């Protein structure tokens, strides 16, 4: 049975543009930046978060492989995707991978949409560890002309509590095609004004993460794609993971369902920059999440801080920290918590999670907006067995 799970859909972040929050004026907000007063969720019990390393290259048992292959073949058509890729790996154990709809000679990397925010947040937290940025400092240092920049902190960008308008809600933007630079996207947000006073509420903002990517560029003095390569991909040996740029080619990424213009997806992904510009194969995404949880990407102090404040996403139990999501999975037989990040648009559905109860990682991605969470939950149940 195709499992229903996680009523939060990241495709809804794209479609929710018809119901934007009411705007306020920065003149209504305190002159000095305030601490984050937005409602938080109760701190979840995540345990010690010390999973054993995955033994990549070691397969699951033949019985487990059989159940997963059968479940994947039966469930994938229900998602509506024409191409997909997935890897499941156990902490302290082996892994299983499968793909569908890929050309033997074509690209193997998919767009991970908002999962890319985890990469951007990690880079900012690394810079904070190095003393090159303070999370409580205001962003007017990097954006002196952005309205209210002297009242918005880096931490509020990380936690989606800045009040900055998310550019994908703009009606004109939604009907445009082609590449949009970070400056263009930030200008859209500036023109709309804030959704609320900084720190007082939570609302998902792609603009905020585009700005974080730009802050990283200004601090390191190099394009974000180079920063991702130097700080993330190269140290972890992630050969497929990269941030697409305007100069990237269609050969670097699996096309979305129904794509007709060769460069369409590259333009979309490159426009996402710090908010959603990452492409990779699932195995490398699991290595990324494993390194986030176990190290060495971040210090234990930074990982703890990333999860110190969990804000409810759209009034649901799913919560957002600093570039990381905490997702309770209600299930009569096997209630658990997923730690990681989701991503989605009409052209991609991505799930990168660590299942705390099963001590199992999953990276799954579709070439269309679909039921990625349900696919993952169904496969995990198949892995469990009878």
Image (cartoon, rainbow, N blue to C red):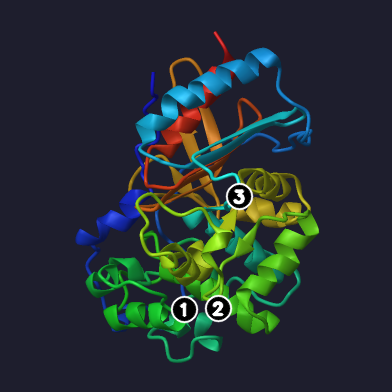
Q: Which dot, 3 or 2, sits closer to the camera?
A: 3
Q: Residues within 10 Å of mark 2 (few under 14, many from 20)?
A: many
Q: Are marks 3 and 2 in contact (CB under 8 Å)?
A: no
Q: Is residue 11 above or below residue 271?
A: above
Say what secondary structure mark 1 lies in. Answer: helix
- Give the percent coordinates (x, y) of residue 222: 67, 81
Say what secondary structure mark 2 lies in. Answer: helix
Q: Residues within 10 Å of mark 3 (few under 14, many from 20)?
A: few
Which numbered dot is residue 346? none
Mark-to-mark CA distance, 3 and 2: 35 Å
Q: Which residue is mark 3?
A: 105
Closer to the chain start, of discs 3 and 2, is: 3
Q: Which residue is mark 1?
A: 182
Instruction: Answer with the quarter of the image where residue 352 lies.
Output: top right
Q: Quadrant of the N terminus?
A: top left
Say what secondary structure mark 3 lies in. Answer: loop
Which numbered dot is residue 214? 2
- Give the percent coordinates (x, y) of residue 131: 73, 75
Q: Are marks 1 and 2 in contact (CB under 8 Å)?
A: yes
Closer to the chain start, of discs 3 and 1, is: 3
């Amino acid at each position: 049975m195709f499992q229903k799970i996680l009523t939060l859909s990241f495709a809804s972040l794209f479609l929710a543009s018809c119901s934007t929050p009411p705007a306020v004026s920065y003149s209504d907000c305190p002159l000095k930046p305030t601490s984050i007063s937005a409602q938080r969720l109760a701190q979840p019990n995540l345990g010690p978060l010390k999973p054993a390393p995955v033994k990549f290259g070691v397969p699951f048992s033949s019985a487990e492989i059989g159940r997963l292959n059968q479940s994947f073949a039966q469930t994938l058509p229900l998602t509506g995707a024409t191409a997909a890729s997935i890897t499941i790996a156990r902490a302290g154990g082996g892994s299983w991978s499968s793909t569908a709809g890929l050309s033997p000679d074509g690209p193997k990397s998919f767009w991970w949409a908002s999962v890319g925010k985890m990469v951007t947040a990690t880079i900012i937290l690394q810079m904070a560890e190095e003393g090159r940025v303070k999370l409580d400092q205001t962003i007017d240092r990097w954006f002196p002309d952005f309205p209210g920049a002297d009242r918005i902190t880096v931490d509020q960008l990380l936690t989606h509590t800045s009040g900055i308008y998310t550019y994908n809600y703009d009606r004109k933007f939604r009907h445009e095609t082609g590449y949009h630079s970070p400056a263009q996207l930030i200008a859209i947000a500036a023109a709309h004004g804030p959704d609320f006073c900084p720190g007082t509420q939570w609302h998902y903002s792609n603009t905020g993460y585009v700005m974080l990517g730009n802050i990283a560029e200004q601090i390191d003095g190099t394009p974000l794609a180079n920063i991702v390569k130097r700080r993330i991909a190269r140290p972890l040996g992630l050969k497929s993971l990269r941030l697409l740029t305007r100069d990237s080619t269609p050969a670097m990424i699996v096309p979305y369902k129904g794509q007709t213009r060769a460069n369409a997806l590259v333009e979309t992904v490159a426009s996402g920059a710090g908010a959603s510009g990452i492409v990779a194969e699932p195995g490398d995404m699991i290595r990324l999440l494993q390194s986030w949880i176990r190290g060495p990407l971040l210090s234990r102090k930074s990982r703890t801080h990333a999860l110190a404040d969990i804000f409810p996403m759209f009034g649901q139990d799913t919560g957002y920290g600093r570039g990381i999501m905490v997702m309770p999975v209600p299930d009569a037989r096997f209630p658990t918590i997923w730690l990681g990040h989701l991503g989605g648009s009409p052209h991609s559905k991505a799930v990168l999670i660590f299942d705390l109860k099963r001590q199992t990682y999953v990276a799954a991605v579709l070439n269309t907006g679909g039921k990625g969470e349900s696919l993952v939950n169904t496969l995990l149940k198949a892995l469990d067995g009878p």
